[in-house]
Amino acid sequence: MAPTLATRYVFNLAIKVGAPIEAGDFGYGHRRVIPILGGELTGEGMHGTIREGGADYQVIRPDGLTELEAKYAIEMDDGAIIYIENIGIRFGPKDALDKIRRGQPVDPALIYFRSVPRFETGALSYRWLMHSLFIGVGTRHPDRVELDVHQVL
């Protein structure tokens, strides 16, 4: 018998984002690049600063589903650097998705926003992040993304 699937909340990422860079429709979707301006990782016994310079590379498909691929670095308070690559999707009612695209607030209960963050680091104290799968549950705000990260046990 397989082990029971369970998760454990690990930390929150509050990711400050800039204005979208619109590359336009390329045939099967609309490409956008969302600059990452900074932010914060907070969790029990963990704190770090999201470094400016990453981005979220998005494709908005004709049905409104948004494919997300974010890449950025986090500097922990102890100086360790953690690279994160976060792949996910966001979907919901058309009017709510249109509001998000225009940078307007939306009730998070209307939006399915899930991701799979993957971590890389040379810091031994955070290598455990590379030895598990994680699921992110996200909320998009006009100026930031909030992502609660859960470890799959």
Image (cartoon, rainbow, N blue to C red):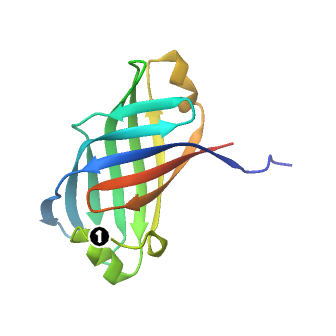
For residue 68, above or below residue 153: below
Q: Quadrant of residue 52?
A: top left
Q: Position of residue 148 (x, y in %)?
A: 50, 50
Report the label total: 1
Q: Quadrant of residue 23?
A: bottom left
Q: Is residue 28 among what the camera can see? A: no
Residue under label 1? 100
For residue 20, above or below residue 54: below
Query: Going 42% across and 76% down the picture, which residue do you hit?
Result: 92
Give the left or right position of residue 9, taking residue 104 as reference: right
Instruction: Give, as a three-letter code, the residue at label 1.
Output: Ile
Q: Nearer the viewer, residue 70 or 143?
A: 143
Query: Going 71% across and 50% down the picture, which residue do you hit?
Result: 6
Query: Going 13% across and 66% down the picture, which residue do you hit?
Result: 24
Q: Nearer the viewer, residue 39 or 72?
A: 39
Q: Is residue 118 among what the camera can see? A: yes
Query: Going 40% across and 31% down the picture, which residue do you hit?
Result: 48
Q: Position of residue 107 (x, y in %)?
A: 41, 73
Q: Quadrant of residue 30?
A: bottom left
For residue 146, above or below residue 97: above
Q: Which residue of the protein is positioned furthest toward the right in this rendering? A: 1
Give the left or right position of residue 22, taking residue 146 as reference: left
Q: Nearer the viewer, residue 67 or 13?
A: 13
Q: Position of residue 46 (x, y in %)?
A: 51, 30
Q: Residues within 10 Å of mark 1 (few under 14, many from 20)?
A: some
Q: Position of residue 43 (x, y in %)?
A: 52, 38
Numbered disc 1: secondary structure: helix
Q: Nearer the viewer, residue 33 or 35?
A: 35
